Image: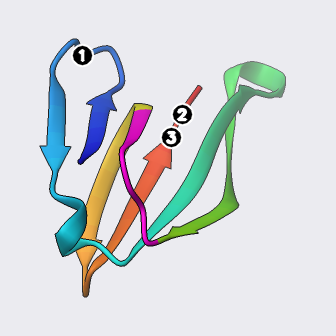
Amino acid sequence: MIQIQRRYKEEVEEINEDDIDLVKINLNITRKVCCGGREKKSYDLGWVESPKDMKLTTVKEYTIHERVLEVWIEP
């Protein structure tokens, strides 16, 4: 079972790992820059093949497309 906990939420969503072949993990970082602006950077952290019993926290959003679960995490 893959458990996903969204950012600032207590509820945990569960996804059956039999429906997923690959989990792609991305990291989004927003930082302050000069004059009140913000800069957003995205990083590809990698993937997990044949996932089993995972718990992902601080997830901003996720999608499932062609048996690939792609998650975006924000610290």
Residue 9: mark in rendering? 1
Residue annotated with mark 3: 73
Q: Amino acid at mark 1?
A: Lys
Q: Amino acid at mark 2?
A: Glu
Residue annotated with mark 2: 74
Look at the picture and state if 75 lies above or below 42: above
Distance from the alpha carbon under mark 2 to that under mark 3: 4 Å
Q: Quarter of the image holding residue 38? A: top right
Mark 3 or mark 1, earlier in chain: 1
Residue that lies at the very extreme toward the front in this rendered image? 52
Q: Nearer the viewer, residue 46 or 28?
A: 46
Judge the density around disc 2: few (<14), some (14-19), many (≥20) Cα neighbours within 10 Å.
some
x, y percentage for residue 57? Answer: 42, 29
Distance from the alpha carbon under mark 2 to that under mark 1: 13 Å
Q: Is residue 51 left or right of residue 28?
A: left
Callout 3: SS = strand
Residue under the image location 58 percent in, 67 percent down: 47
Q: Amino acid at mark 3?
A: Ile
* Span shown in magenta: 50-56
Residue under the image location 46 percent in, 49 percent down: 72
- Asked if labels 1 and 3 touch by Cβ distance under 8 angstroms, the answer is no
